[in-house]
Image (spheres, grey):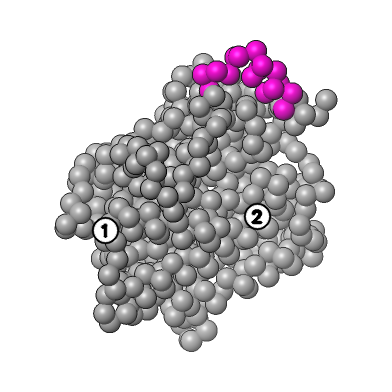
Protein backbone atom coordinates (compact mmCIF):
# COMPACT_ATOMS: atom_id res chain seq x y z
CA UNK A 1 0.00 0.00 0.00
CA UNK A 2 1.39 3.44 -0.93
CA UNK A 3 2.07 5.88 1.90
CA UNK A 4 -0.62 8.33 0.79
CA UNK A 5 -3.18 5.54 0.47
CA UNK A 6 -2.22 4.33 3.94
CA UNK A 7 -2.74 7.78 5.41
CA UNK A 8 -6.18 8.08 3.86
CA UNK A 9 -7.17 4.54 4.90
CA UNK A 10 -5.87 4.96 8.44
CA UNK A 11 -7.57 8.30 8.81
CA UNK A 12 -10.91 6.87 7.70
CA UNK A 13 -10.57 3.88 9.98
CA UNK A 14 -9.60 5.99 12.97
CA UNK A 15 -12.50 8.33 12.40
CA UNK A 16 -14.89 5.40 12.14
CA UNK A 17 -13.67 4.03 15.47
CA UNK A 18 -14.09 7.38 17.12
CA UNK A 19 -10.47 7.70 18.08
CA UNK A 20 -10.20 11.14 16.52
CA UNK A 21 -13.13 12.69 18.32
CA UNK A 22 -10.86 15.02 20.26
CA UNK A 23 -9.29 16.28 17.06
CA UNK A 24 -12.56 16.63 15.14
CA UNK A 25 -12.90 20.40 15.65
CA UNK A 26 -9.41 20.80 14.24
CA UNK A 27 -10.23 18.86 11.10
CA UNK A 28 -13.26 20.95 10.16
CA UNK A 29 -12.22 24.55 10.62
CA UNK A 30 -14.99 26.80 9.36
CA UNK A 31 -13.81 29.24 6.67
CA UNK A 32 -13.86 32.88 7.72
CA UNK A 33 -14.64 35.44 5.05
CA UNK A 34 -14.00 39.14 5.41
CA UNK A 35 -17.04 40.01 3.31
CA UNK A 36 -19.52 38.92 5.97
CA UNK A 37 -20.34 40.15 9.46
CA UNK A 38 -21.64 37.00 11.09
CA UNK A 39 -21.73 36.07 14.75
CA UNK A 40 -18.98 33.56 14.04
CA UNK A 41 -16.67 36.29 12.80
CA UNK A 42 -17.50 38.46 15.79
CA UNK A 43 -16.60 35.66 18.19
CA UNK A 44 -13.26 35.14 16.42
CA UNK A 45 -12.48 38.84 16.44
CA UNK A 46 -13.24 38.93 20.16
CA UNK A 47 -10.49 36.37 20.71
CA UNK A 48 -7.96 37.73 18.23
CA UNK A 49 -7.35 41.34 17.38
CA UNK A 50 -6.89 40.52 13.71
CA UNK A 51 -8.58 37.51 12.16
CA UNK A 52 -7.08 34.55 10.34
CA UNK A 53 -9.07 33.06 7.47
CA UNK A 54 -8.01 29.45 7.97
CA UNK A 55 -7.11 28.72 11.58
CA UNK A 56 -3.65 27.38 12.34
CA UNK A 57 -3.70 24.02 10.56
CA UNK A 58 -4.25 22.03 13.73
CA UNK A 59 -1.62 23.65 15.97
CA UNK A 60 -2.72 25.05 19.30
CA UNK A 61 -1.43 28.63 19.20
CA UNK A 62 -0.94 30.75 22.29
CA UNK A 63 -0.75 34.52 21.92
CA UNK A 64 2.04 36.34 23.76
CA UNK A 65 2.72 39.96 24.66
CA UNK A 66 3.69 42.65 22.22
CA UNK A 67 7.43 43.40 22.22
CA UNK A 68 7.90 45.39 25.41
CA UNK A 69 4.55 44.19 26.75
CA UNK A 70 2.30 46.95 25.44
CA UNK A 71 1.28 48.88 22.38
CA UNK A 72 -0.18 52.40 22.20
CA UNK A 73 -2.29 52.61 19.08
CA UNK A 74 -2.47 56.40 19.47
CA UNK A 75 1.31 56.72 19.58
CA UNK A 76 2.74 53.91 17.42
CA UNK A 77 6.49 53.50 17.35
CA UNK A 78 9.10 50.87 16.60
CA UNK A 79 9.83 48.36 19.34
CA UNK A 80 13.22 48.65 21.02
CA UNK A 81 14.19 45.05 21.75
CA UNK A 82 16.82 46.24 24.20
CA UNK A 83 13.93 47.25 26.44
CA UNK A 84 12.45 43.73 26.22
CA UNK A 85 13.10 40.42 27.93
CA UNK A 86 11.92 38.44 24.94
CA UNK A 87 10.54 38.61 21.42
CA UNK A 88 7.89 35.94 21.32
CA UNK A 89 9.50 32.78 22.71
CA UNK A 90 13.05 34.01 21.97
CA UNK A 91 14.78 35.15 25.14
CA UNK A 92 16.73 38.39 25.11
CA UNK A 93 19.67 38.30 27.50
CA UNK A 94 21.93 41.14 26.36
CA UNK A 95 22.27 44.14 24.11
CA UNK A 96 21.02 43.49 20.57
CA UNK A 97 22.97 45.50 18.02
CA UNK A 98 21.66 46.53 14.64
CA UNK A 99 23.78 45.02 11.89
CA UNK A 100 24.82 46.06 8.38
CA UNK A 101 23.55 44.06 5.44
CA UNK A 102 27.15 43.29 4.48
CA UNK A 103 27.37 41.12 7.61
CA UNK A 104 24.80 38.63 6.27
CA UNK A 105 25.97 35.24 4.98
CA UNK A 106 25.18 35.66 1.29
CA UNK A 107 26.73 39.14 1.14
CA UNK A 108 29.83 37.78 2.87
CA UNK A 109 30.06 35.08 0.20
CA UNK A 110 29.26 37.31 -2.78
CA UNK A 111 31.82 39.94 -1.75
CA UNK A 112 34.62 37.41 -1.17
CA UNK A 113 34.81 37.41 2.63
CA UNK A 114 34.63 33.60 2.64
CA UNK A 115 37.31 33.24 -0.03
CA UNK A 116 37.68 33.74 -3.77
CA UNK A 117 34.50 32.72 -5.56
CA UNK A 118 36.32 30.86 -8.32
CA UNK A 119 38.27 28.82 -5.74
CA UNK A 120 35.12 27.93 -3.79
CA UNK A 121 33.29 26.85 -6.94
CA UNK A 122 36.24 24.86 -8.22
CA UNK A 123 36.48 23.02 -4.90
CA UNK A 124 32.79 22.06 -5.11
CA UNK A 125 33.03 20.58 -8.58
CA UNK A 126 30.86 21.04 -11.70
CA UNK A 127 27.94 23.34 -11.05
CA UNK A 128 24.24 22.90 -11.69
CA UNK A 129 22.46 25.19 -14.16
CA UNK A 130 18.78 26.09 -13.75
CA UNK A 131 17.37 28.07 -16.70
CA UNK A 132 14.01 28.52 -14.96
CA UNK A 133 15.62 29.55 -11.69
CA UNK A 134 17.63 32.21 -13.48
CA UNK A 135 14.53 33.36 -15.37
CA UNK A 136 12.68 33.86 -12.09
CA UNK A 137 15.56 35.93 -10.71
CA UNK A 138 15.43 38.07 -13.86
CA UNK A 139 11.67 38.45 -13.47
CA UNK A 140 11.94 39.88 -9.96
CA UNK A 141 14.89 42.19 -10.67
CA UNK A 142 12.84 45.16 -11.98
CA UNK A 143 10.81 45.07 -8.76
CA UNK A 144 14.02 45.67 -6.78
CA UNK A 145 14.42 49.22 -8.09
CA UNK A 146 13.66 52.14 -5.80
CA UNK A 147 10.80 53.19 -8.08
CA UNK A 148 9.03 49.93 -7.21
CA UNK A 149 9.92 49.41 -3.55
CA UNK A 150 9.48 53.01 -2.40
CA UNK A 151 8.14 56.38 -3.44
CA UNK A 152 6.27 59.45 -2.30
CA UNK A 153 2.76 58.92 -0.96
CA UNK A 154 -0.32 60.66 -2.29
CA UNK A 155 -0.28 64.30 -1.12
CA UNK A 156 -3.74 64.07 0.46
CA UNK A 157 -4.61 61.12 2.69
CA UNK A 158 -7.76 59.27 1.73
CA UNK A 159 -10.23 58.26 4.45
CA UNK A 160 -9.64 54.69 5.63
CA UNK A 161 -11.32 52.42 8.22
CA UNK A 162 -10.13 52.18 11.82
CA UNK A 163 -6.90 50.17 12.39
CA UNK A 164 -8.40 46.73 13.12
CA UNK A 165 -10.58 46.80 10.02
CA UNK A 166 -7.75 48.19 7.91
CA UNK A 167 -5.44 45.42 9.08
CA UNK A 168 -8.05 42.90 8.10
CA UNK A 169 -8.34 44.59 4.70
CA UNK A 170 -4.57 44.46 4.10
CA UNK A 171 -4.57 40.74 4.88
CA UNK A 172 -7.47 40.21 2.51
CA UNK A 173 -5.44 41.87 -0.24
CA UNK A 174 -2.44 39.65 0.48
CA UNK A 175 -4.59 36.51 0.35
CA UNK A 176 -6.32 37.76 -2.78
CA UNK A 177 -2.87 38.12 -4.34
CA UNK A 178 -2.13 34.49 -3.50
CA UNK A 179 -0.18 34.78 -0.24
CA UNK A 180 -0.18 31.71 1.98
CA UNK A 181 -0.15 33.85 5.11
CA UNK A 182 0.11 37.46 6.16
CA UNK A 183 0.75 39.04 9.54
CA UNK A 184 1.19 42.56 10.84
CA UNK A 185 3.63 43.40 13.60
CA UNK A 186 5.23 46.25 15.44
CA UNK A 187 8.53 46.81 13.62
CA UNK A 188 11.50 46.00 15.90
CA UNK A 189 14.10 48.75 15.61
CA UNK A 190 16.89 46.16 15.67
CA UNK A 191 15.43 44.43 12.60
CA UNK A 192 16.52 47.31 10.39
CA UNK A 193 19.98 47.28 8.86
CA UNK A 194 22.10 50.31 9.67
CA UNK A 195 23.52 50.21 6.13
CA UNK A 196 22.42 48.52 2.92
CA UNK A 197 24.83 47.12 0.35
CA UNK A 198 24.54 48.55 -3.15
CA UNK A 199 21.60 47.03 -5.02
CA UNK A 200 21.85 45.81 -8.61
CA UNK A 201 20.24 49.11 -9.64
CA UNK A 202 22.89 51.11 -7.78
CA UNK A 203 25.67 49.02 -9.32
CA UNK A 204 24.23 49.63 -12.79
CA UNK A 205 24.44 53.34 -12.05
CA UNK A 206 28.13 53.15 -11.11
CA UNK A 207 28.28 52.05 -7.48
CA UNK A 208 30.70 49.34 -6.37
CA UNK A 209 29.11 46.06 -5.16
CA UNK A 210 30.62 46.63 -1.70
CA UNK A 211 29.42 50.24 -1.36
CA UNK A 212 27.12 50.83 1.60
CA UNK A 213 24.30 53.30 2.09
CA UNK A 214 22.87 54.42 5.43
CA UNK A 215 19.26 53.45 6.12
CA UNK A 216 16.63 55.72 7.61
CA UNK A 217 13.25 54.19 8.42
CA UNK A 218 10.89 55.24 11.21
CA UNK A 219 7.86 53.22 10.10
CA UNK A 220 6.19 51.67 13.17
CA UNK A 221 4.47 48.77 11.39
CA UNK A 222 5.65 45.80 9.34
CA UNK A 223 3.42 43.66 7.13
CA UNK A 224 4.86 40.17 6.62
CA UNK A 225 3.84 38.29 3.46
CA UNK A 226 4.56 34.55 3.15
CA UNK A 227 4.54 32.30 0.09
CA UNK A 228 4.85 28.53 0.31
CA UNK A 229 7.79 27.04 -1.58
CA UNK A 230 5.40 24.20 -2.44
CA UNK A 231 5.35 20.65 -1.15
CA UNK A 232 5.95 19.11 -4.56
CA UNK A 233 8.80 21.28 -5.84
CA UNK A 234 10.55 21.49 -2.48
CA UNK A 235 9.95 18.27 -0.58
CA UNK A 236 9.61 16.13 -3.67
CA UNK A 237 12.44 17.47 -5.81
CA UNK A 238 14.12 14.85 -7.95
CA UNK A 239 17.38 14.86 -6.01
CA UNK A 240 16.52 16.76 -2.84
CA UNK A 241 18.24 19.96 -3.95
CA UNK A 242 17.14 21.22 -7.36
CA UNK A 243 13.64 21.89 -6.06
CA UNK A 244 15.17 24.48 -3.77
CA UNK A 245 16.14 26.48 -6.82
CA UNK A 246 12.75 26.44 -8.44
CA UNK A 247 10.47 26.50 -5.40
CA UNK A 248 12.44 29.17 -3.55
CA UNK A 249 12.79 31.53 -6.49
CA UNK A 250 9.14 31.13 -7.44
CA UNK A 251 8.16 32.05 -3.87
CA UNK A 252 10.61 34.99 -3.87
CA UNK A 253 9.08 36.24 -7.12
CA UNK A 254 5.53 36.11 -5.80
CA UNK A 255 6.15 37.65 -2.39
CA UNK A 256 8.46 40.33 -3.86
CA UNK A 257 6.04 41.51 -6.53
CA UNK A 258 3.06 41.45 -4.16
CA UNK A 259 4.99 43.40 -1.50
CA UNK A 260 5.65 46.11 -4.08
CA UNK A 261 1.97 46.19 -5.06
CA UNK A 262 0.79 46.46 -1.45
CA UNK A 263 3.37 49.18 -0.69
CA UNK A 264 2.23 51.13 -3.75
CA UNK A 265 -1.40 50.69 -2.73
CA UNK A 266 -0.69 52.12 0.72
CA UNK A 267 1.14 55.08 -0.82
CA UNK A 268 -1.90 55.63 -3.07
CA UNK A 269 -3.92 56.00 0.13
CA UNK A 270 -1.59 58.76 1.28
CA UNK A 271 0.69 56.91 3.70
CA UNK A 272 4.37 56.04 3.56
CA UNK A 273 5.28 52.44 2.72
CA UNK A 274 8.36 50.55 1.55
CA UNK A 275 8.65 47.02 0.24
CA UNK A 276 11.54 44.81 1.35
CA UNK A 277 12.21 41.64 -0.63
CA UNK A 278 14.93 39.42 -2.05
CA UNK A 279 16.16 42.05 -4.51
CA UNK A 280 16.11 44.96 -2.07
CA UNK A 281 16.12 44.26 1.67
CA UNK A 282 16.69 46.97 4.25
CA UNK A 283 15.94 44.74 7.21
CA UNK A 284 16.38 41.31 8.75
CA UNK A 285 13.15 39.42 8.15
CA UNK A 286 13.38 37.04 11.15
CA UNK A 287 12.42 39.43 13.99
CA UNK A 288 9.68 40.93 11.81
CA UNK A 289 8.08 37.51 11.31
CA UNK A 290 8.16 36.79 15.03
CA UNK A 291 6.72 40.21 15.91
CA UNK A 292 3.97 39.70 13.30
CA UNK A 293 2.88 36.39 14.80
CA UNK A 294 4.15 34.29 11.91
CA UNK A 295 6.05 31.76 14.00
CA UNK A 296 8.88 31.01 16.40
CA UNK A 297 12.65 30.89 16.05
CA UNK A 298 13.67 27.30 15.23
CA UNK A 299 16.80 25.18 15.52
CA UNK A 300 17.85 26.23 12.02
CA UNK A 301 19.79 29.45 12.52
CA UNK A 302 17.47 32.40 12.10
CA UNK A 303 14.65 30.49 10.38
CA UNK A 304 11.18 31.15 11.75
CA UNK A 305 8.98 28.05 11.96
CA UNK A 306 5.37 28.68 10.90
CA UNK A 307 2.47 26.58 12.30
CA UNK A 308 1.59 24.96 8.97
CA UNK A 309 4.29 26.07 6.51
CA UNK A 310 7.19 25.06 8.72
CA UNK A 311 9.95 27.13 7.18
CA UNK A 312 9.32 25.90 3.65
CA UNK A 313 8.38 29.42 2.55
CA UNK A 314 9.85 32.76 1.50
CA UNK A 315 8.86 36.11 2.93
CA UNK A 316 8.73 39.77 1.99
CA UNK A 317 7.91 42.74 4.21
CA UNK A 318 6.18 46.08 3.79
CA UNK A 319 6.99 48.72 6.39
CA UNK A 320 4.51 51.57 6.76
CA UNK A 321 3.14 54.36 8.93
CA UNK A 322 -0.48 53.67 7.99
CA UNK A 323 -2.50 53.09 11.20
CA UNK A 324 -2.90 49.34 11.74
CA UNK A 325 -3.69 46.92 14.55
CA UNK A 326 -0.68 44.61 14.90
CA UNK A 327 -0.80 40.90 15.63
CA UNK A 328 0.94 39.47 18.67
CA UNK A 329 3.85 37.00 18.73
CA UNK A 330 2.80 33.37 19.11
CA UNK A 331 3.87 30.20 20.90
CA UNK A 332 2.93 26.78 19.51
CA UNK A 333 5.64 24.63 21.08
CA UNK A 334 8.55 25.07 18.66
CA UNK A 335 11.20 25.50 21.37
CA UNK A 336 10.20 22.21 22.95
CA UNK A 337 9.83 20.35 19.64
CA UNK A 338 13.14 21.51 18.14
CA UNK A 339 14.97 20.50 21.30
CA UNK A 340 13.67 16.94 20.88
CA UNK A 341 13.53 16.42 17.10
CA UNK A 342 16.96 17.39 15.66
CA UNK A 343 16.16 15.95 12.21
CA UNK A 344 17.48 19.08 10.49
CA UNK A 345 20.83 18.77 12.27
CA UNK A 346 21.16 15.07 11.45
CA UNK A 347 20.24 15.55 7.79
CA UNK A 348 22.19 18.78 7.15
CA UNK A 349 24.63 17.95 4.31
CA UNK A 350 27.11 20.62 5.41
CA UNK A 351 26.74 19.80 9.12
CA UNK A 352 26.10 23.48 9.84
CA UNK A 353 23.16 23.00 12.24
CA UNK A 354 23.83 22.34 15.91
CA UNK A 355 22.42 19.19 17.56
CA UNK A 356 22.99 20.61 21.05
CA UNK A 357 20.19 20.53 23.61
CA UNK A 358 21.01 24.06 24.71
CA UNK A 359 20.86 27.41 22.99
CA UNK A 360 23.67 29.96 23.01
CA UNK A 361 23.73 33.74 23.22
CA UNK A 362 24.11 35.42 19.86
CA UNK A 363 23.95 39.22 19.53
CA UNK A 364 22.01 39.50 22.79
CA UNK A 365 19.41 36.76 22.24
CA UNK A 366 19.32 32.99 22.69
CA UNK A 367 19.37 30.65 19.70
CA UNK A 368 20.78 27.36 18.46
CA UNK A 369 24.20 27.83 16.94
CA UNK A 370 24.53 27.77 13.16
CA UNK A 371 27.73 27.83 11.12
CA UNK A 372 26.68 30.53 8.65
CA UNK A 373 29.87 30.19 6.64
CA UNK A 374 29.68 26.47 5.88
CA UNK A 375 25.92 26.70 5.29
CA UNK A 376 26.27 29.60 2.85
CA UNK A 377 29.20 28.11 0.92
CA UNK A 378 27.35 24.83 0.47
CA UNK A 379 24.19 26.58 -0.70
CA UNK A 380 26.14 28.69 -3.18
CA UNK A 381 28.38 25.98 -4.61
CA UNK A 382 26.93 22.49 -4.20
CA UNK A 383 26.77 20.73 -7.58
CA UNK A 384 23.23 19.32 -7.48
CA UNK A 385 21.37 22.62 -7.47
CA UNK A 386 21.62 26.27 -6.55
CA UNK A 387 20.72 26.26 -2.88
CA UNK A 388 19.82 23.50 -0.50
CA UNK A 389 16.77 23.62 1.79
CA UNK A 390 17.37 20.10 3.06
CA UNK A 391 16.43 21.28 6.56
CA UNK A 392 13.06 22.52 5.31
CA UNK A 393 12.49 19.26 3.44
CA UNK A 394 12.96 17.01 6.47
CA UNK A 395 11.31 19.24 9.10
CA UNK A 396 8.10 17.59 10.36
CA UNK A 397 6.50 21.05 10.62
CA UNK A 398 7.10 21.93 6.97
CA UNK A 399 4.01 21.97 4.80
CA UNK A 400 3.10 18.47 3.69
CA UNK A 401 0.17 17.01 1.83
CA UNK A 402 -3.12 17.44 3.75
CA UNK A 403 -3.82 14.48 6.00
CA UNK A 404 -5.26 13.57 9.38
CA UNK A 405 -1.76 12.67 10.56
CA UNK A 406 -0.35 16.15 10.07
CA UNK A 407 -3.38 17.86 11.58
CA UNK A 408 -3.22 15.69 14.66
CA UNK A 409 0.58 15.85 14.87
CA UNK A 410 0.49 19.66 14.69
CA UNK A 411 -1.91 19.75 17.62
CA UNK A 412 0.01 17.24 19.72
CA UNK A 413 3.37 18.85 18.95
CA UNK A 414 2.13 22.17 20.28
CA UNK A 415 1.50 20.54 23.68
CA UNK A 416 5.23 20.64 24.52
CA UNK A 417 5.55 17.02 25.59
CA UNK A 418 9.01 15.56 24.95
CA UNK A 419 7.86 11.95 24.66
CA UNK A 420 5.05 12.84 22.25
CA UNK A 421 7.40 14.99 20.18
CA UNK A 422 9.83 12.11 19.84
CA UNK A 423 7.04 9.80 18.64
CA UNK A 424 5.87 12.36 16.08
CA UNK A 425 9.38 12.86 14.70
CA UNK A 426 9.81 9.08 14.44
CA UNK A 427 6.44 8.65 12.73
CA UNK A 428 7.46 11.30 10.21
CA UNK A 429 10.37 9.02 9.33
CA UNK A 430 8.14 5.95 9.18
CA UNK A 431 5.89 7.65 6.65
CA UNK A 432 8.95 8.53 4.60
CA UNK A 433 8.66 12.31 4.58
CA UNK A 434 11.78 14.06 3.43
CA UNK A 435 13.00 11.04 1.46
CA UNK A 436 10.71 11.21 -1.59
CA UNK A 437 12.07 11.09 -5.10
CA UNK A 438 9.27 12.04 -7.47
CA UNK A 439 10.49 13.30 -10.81
CA UNK A 440 6.96 13.37 -12.20
CA UNK A 441 6.34 16.53 -10.18
CA UNK A 442 9.23 18.47 -11.67
CA UNK A 443 8.17 21.71 -13.35
CA UNK A 444 11.59 22.72 -14.63
CA UNK A 445 14.60 21.51 -16.58
CA UNK A 446 17.95 21.21 -14.85
CA UNK A 447 21.45 20.80 -16.26
CA UNK A 448 24.03 19.33 -13.87
CA UNK A 449 27.62 20.20 -14.61
CA UNK A 450 26.86 23.11 -16.94
CA UNK A 451 27.55 26.06 -14.67
CA UNK A 452 25.16 28.74 -13.41
Q: Quadrant of the C terminus?
A: bottom right
**What residue range appears in magenta?**
8-23
Q: Nearer the viewer, residue 301 or 1?
A: 1
Q: Is residue 9 magenta?
A: yes
Is residue 30 depicted above or below 195 in this figure? above
Read off the residue under disc 1: 162
Say whether residue 443 is visible.
Answer: yes
Q: Is residue 249 left or right of residue 356?
A: right
> Mark 1 or mark 2, which is nearer the start of the sequence?
1
Q: Nearer the viewer, residue 111 or 129?
A: 129
Q: Position of residue 431 (x, y in %)?
A: 71, 27
Q: Nearer the viewer, mark 2 or mark 1?
A: 1
What residue do we see at 72% from left, 53% from top? 242
Residue 43 occupies quadrant = top left
In percent of the image, x 27 and y 75: which residue is there?
A: 157
**Residue at (82%, 48%) from the top-left corner?**
440
| Magenta-drawn stretch contains 118 | no
Q: CA distance from mark 2 to mark 1?
A: 37 Å
Dot 2 corresponds to which residue? Answer: 247
Q: How many marks?
A: 2
Amino acid sequence: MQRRDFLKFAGSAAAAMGTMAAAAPLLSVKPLLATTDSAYESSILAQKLVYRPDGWGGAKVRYLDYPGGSFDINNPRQADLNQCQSLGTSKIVGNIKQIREIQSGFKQYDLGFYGKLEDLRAAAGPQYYSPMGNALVFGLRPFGTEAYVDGEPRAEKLPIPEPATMSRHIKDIAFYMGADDCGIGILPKQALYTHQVATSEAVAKGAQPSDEFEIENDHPYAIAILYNQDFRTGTMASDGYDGGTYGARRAYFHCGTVACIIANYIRNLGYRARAHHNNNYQLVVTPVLIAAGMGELSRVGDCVLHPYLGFNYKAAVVTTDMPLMPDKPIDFGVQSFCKTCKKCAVECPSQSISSSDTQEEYNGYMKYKLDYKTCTIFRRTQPQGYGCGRCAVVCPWSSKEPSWFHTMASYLSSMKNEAVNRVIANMDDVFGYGTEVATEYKSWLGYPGMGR
